[in-house]
Image (cartoon, helix red, strand yellow):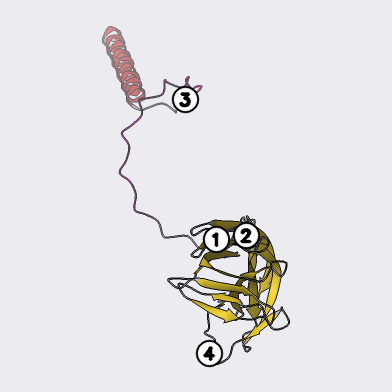
Amino acid sequence: MEQEQQEQQEQQEQQEQQEQQEQQEQQEQQEQQEPGATGATGATGATGATGATGATGATGATGATGATGATGATGATGATGGGAIIPFASGTTPSALVNALVANTGTLLGFGFSQPGVALTGGTSITLALGIGDYAFVAPRAGTITSLAGFFSATAALAPLSPVQVQIQILTAPAASNTFTVQGAPLLLTPAFAIIAILDTASGIIPEAIPVAAGDKVLLYVSLTAASPIAAVAGFVSAGINIV
């Protein structure tokens, strides 16, 4: 009897041990299946090599035009231009240049025409009147006459008592006036003629500094110098002035 009880007790103990062992194994299996807590973040690894450059993207749409910038500073004044050249010529009719006892007369020089037989009043001025054509031009702007050039070609032979010299003078008149006054220095054409043959020539150029206002009228007058003797000289005359 005691032996049976002892065997039962041993069987019971073995069964309990087996149950404990099974519970322990189940607990271990459960612990293995459940994830553990996240570990600390490891140190950052070294930067990898730069990859190849990608293809260029498509050009974007043009942006709106920006506001106009401020006006820049005014540049330096440029060099003065060469000016305008005004031509004169006597045309088909020779100019008559006369020194006489009573009065000296010369020719108004125009633009392909001329008016002979005109005398300067007091040697300094001309007033346009009936019988005297208008050979002046009107200055469209203010400026300065800076030079005068001229040329004479004889159309008749002459043997004067002493050398004669041709001169060209500039005269101007205000906008509302018909009276022209000599301005600047006369242009003395060279050479002076001791004896004149047909087609003999004289020429010259001189600097001037004659101011003109817008609307002023400008006229050229051709004559013999006062120092020339009594004589009558004929020839074609051309001239030009520069105005800046």
Tag 2: amino acid = Leu
Q: Nearer the viewer, mark 3 or mark 4?
A: 4
Question: Can you give x and y, in whole percent of width and height, for residue 162 in the image?
Answer: 68, 61
Q: Are marks 3 and 2 in contact (CB under 8 Å)?
A: no
Measure the alpha-carbon separation of dots 3 and 2: 116 Å
Q: Earlier in the sequence, mark 2 or mark 4?
A: 4
The answer to whether marks 2 and 4 mark residues whose Cβ atoms lie closer than 8 Å is no
Amino acid beneath label 1: Phe
| Residue type at the position of mark 4 | Gly
Is 97 within the magenta? Answer: no
Say which mark, if any, is on residue 189: 2
CB atoms at circles 2 and 1 under 8 Å apart?
A: yes
User: If the image is split into quadrants, where does the C terminus sit?
Assistant: bottom right
Q: Residue 39 shows which numbered tag? A: 3
Give the label, 3 or 2, closer to the camera.
2
Q: Residue at x 48, y 71 (%)?
A: 94
- Which mark sits nearer the N-terminus, 1 or 3? 3
**Mark 1, secondary structure of its residue:** strand
Mark 1 or mark 2, which is nearer the start of the sequence?
A: 1
Dots 3, 4 in contact, CB < 8 A: no
- Left/right placement of residue 229 relative to residue 217 reads right
Q: Earlier in the sequence, mark 1 or mark 4?
A: 4
Determine the image quadrant of residue 166.
Answer: bottom right
Q: Specify the label residue 151 is tagged with.
A: 1
- In the picture provided, is 240 more to the left or to the right than 228? left
Q: Is residue 58 magenta?
A: yes
Rendered location of residue 37, percent (x, y): 44, 28
Labelled disc at residue 131:
4
Q: Are marks 1 and 3 in contact (CB under 8 Å)?
A: no
Mark in the foreground, 1 or 3:
1
Q: Report, in whole angstroms, how far the alpha carbon at label 1 lies from the one at label 3.
A: 114 Å
Dot 4, crowdedness within 10 Å: few (<14), some or many (≥20)? few
